[in-house]
Amino acid sequence: MFPNKKIQSLVGSRIQVEMKGENTILEGILSGADEYLNMHLVDSVEVEDGRKIKSLGSVILRGNNVVLVNPL
Amino acid sequence: MFPNKKIQSLVGSRIQVEMKGENTILEGILSGADEYLNMHLVDSVEVEDGRKIKSLGSVILRGNNVVLVNPL
Amino acid sequence: MFPNKKIQSLVGSRIQVEMKGENTILEGILSGADEYLNMHLVDSVEVEDGRKIKSLGSVILRGNNVVLVNPL
Amino acid sequence: MFPNKKIQSLVGSRIQVEMKGENTILEGILSGADEYLNMHLVDSVEVEDGRKIKSLGSVILRGNNVVLVNPL
Amino acid sequence: MFPNKKIQSLVGSRIQVEMKGENTILEGILSGADEYLNMHLVDSVEVEDGRKIKSLGSVILRGNNVVLVNPL
Amino acid sequence: MFPNKKIQSLVGSRIQVEMKGENTILEGILSGADEYLNMHLVDSVEVEDGRKIKSLGSVILRGNNVVLVNPL
C-alpha cells in the first residue's frame, strides 16, 4: 500500500511515532495528517522502554522529522 | 484536525516547541506561523527541566527543524 | 538504473533500510513506496549485528530520513 | 507577524543565529535573506558563552540548517 | 561545472559517497542518479580507514542524506 | 546581498565550507553552484584546526547539508 494511503487509514487509531531529536517514542491517537506526514496527535504520551513517562496531550509533529510510524 | 489548521488555531497562545539541535525547550507566544511551520515567537524563554533558564524575547524558528509543538 | 525505478522494482521484495535516528537496521517486505522514498514495510523487524531484536509488523518510513536501501 | 516578514524586517540589523551542526552561535549583520531563510551575514563572529571566539567576516548560511534567529 | 552535470558525468564510474548517519564511506559504481542526488550504486562496499569492511552490492541512497561525492 | 547572488559571485574563488556530518572544514575552488547550494569544488582539501589533513580533489556537495560558506 502507498505510504500516504496507509497513514490516512490510521486516522482515529492509536499509533507510535519515532521522531528525530527525541530519545523517547511518542504514542497517541492520530487526529490528522497531511501529505508531508505532519501529524496532529491527541491523548499523547512519551514512552520509554515500554513505560509511559510523560503526558503531553495534544501535539503537532513536523513530518520531515518523523522517522517511523508504527500502528498499535 | 489537520496539523496546519491546528497550528493556526494556536496563534496568540502560549506554546512549547522542541527544536532539533536544541537541548532546551522553547516557550513563547506564537505570533505567526506559515505553512512550513516556520514560526515567530514573542516573549520567549528557554526551559530546562521545567525551569526558565534564559530569556530570548522575539525569535524566528525554521519549520523543518521543529520536532514537536505542544500547546500549554 | 534510476534510483526511483530501482525502488519500484523492489515492491514485494524483502529489503533492509538504514534510517537516520535509528541505531538498528529495519528489515521487511516493501509494500509500497512513493517518489519521495516514503515506504510502507510489512512483516518488519529491527536487526542489530545480524540478529532480529524486535518485531515491528507494519511500519511507515519517512523518505527524507532514509539513508540507504539494500535489497536482500 | 509572519516569520518571513519578520526576517525581512531585520535586514541591516545585528542578529544571532543558531545553526544545526555548530556548537557556537553566529552573530552578524543580516545583509540579505530569501524565502528559505538562506542568509548572508557580514561582520560576523562566532560567539560562545557570550564571548567572541572567532571572526568570520562574510558568511552564507543555508536556511534549512538554521534553527533559530534572535534579533539583538 | 554545475553540480548535477558533474554527477551525470560520473555515471558508470567508481565513486565514494559520504552519507549522514553513516560512520563509513560507501564506494561503488554509480549506476544512476536523479536531480535530487538520489543514487543507485552497484558493486558497493563500506570503506573505513581505507579498508573494505563490508560488501553491500546494490544500494539506493537518498539524495538529501548525501554529504559529499568524491570521484575515484 | 541575496545569499544566492553572493554564492554566484564566488564561482572561481577559494572558499571554506562547513558540512553537516563532517568534523572537518572543506576548502576548495568553487567550480559551480546551483540555486539549492549544491556545489562543485575542485582542488579541495579537508582542513582541521587550520591544517590541511587530506587532499580530495574534485567533490560534489549536497546543498541541504551545507551549514556555512565562508569566502577566503
Image (cartoon, coloured by chain):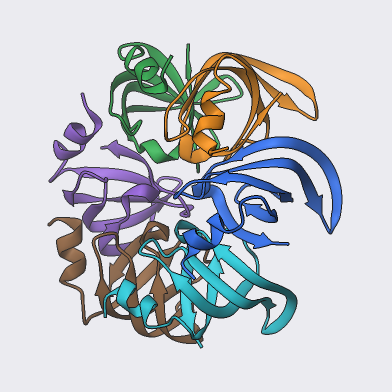
Chain colours: A blue, B orange, C cyan, D green, E brown, F purple
Can residue E49 be seen at all in this image of the molecule? no
Classify the position of the N terminus of chain B by image quarter.
top right
Write the residue at 29% across / 59% down: E36
Near-viewer residue (D50 or E64): E64
Residue E19 in the image: state x and y as whole percent: 44, 64
Write the residue at 80% across / 30% down: B49
Near-viewer residue (C64 or F10): C64
Residue E47 vertical placement versus D26 (above, below):
below
Residue D43 in the image: state x and y as whole percent: 33, 20
Examine the image and state in which quarter residue B15 appears: top right
Q: Answer with left or right where residue E24 lies relative to residue F9.
A: right
Count of numbered tags: 0
Write the residue at 34% across / 12% down: D9
Near-viewer residue (B31 or F4): B31
Residue B53 vertical placement versus F32 (above, below):
above
Residue F8 in the image: state x and y as whole percent: 15, 39
Examine the image and state in which quarter residue B55 appears: top right
Residue D10 vertical placement versus B1 (above, below):
above
Residue F10 in the image: state x and y as whole percent: 17, 39
Near-viewer residue (E10 or D46): E10
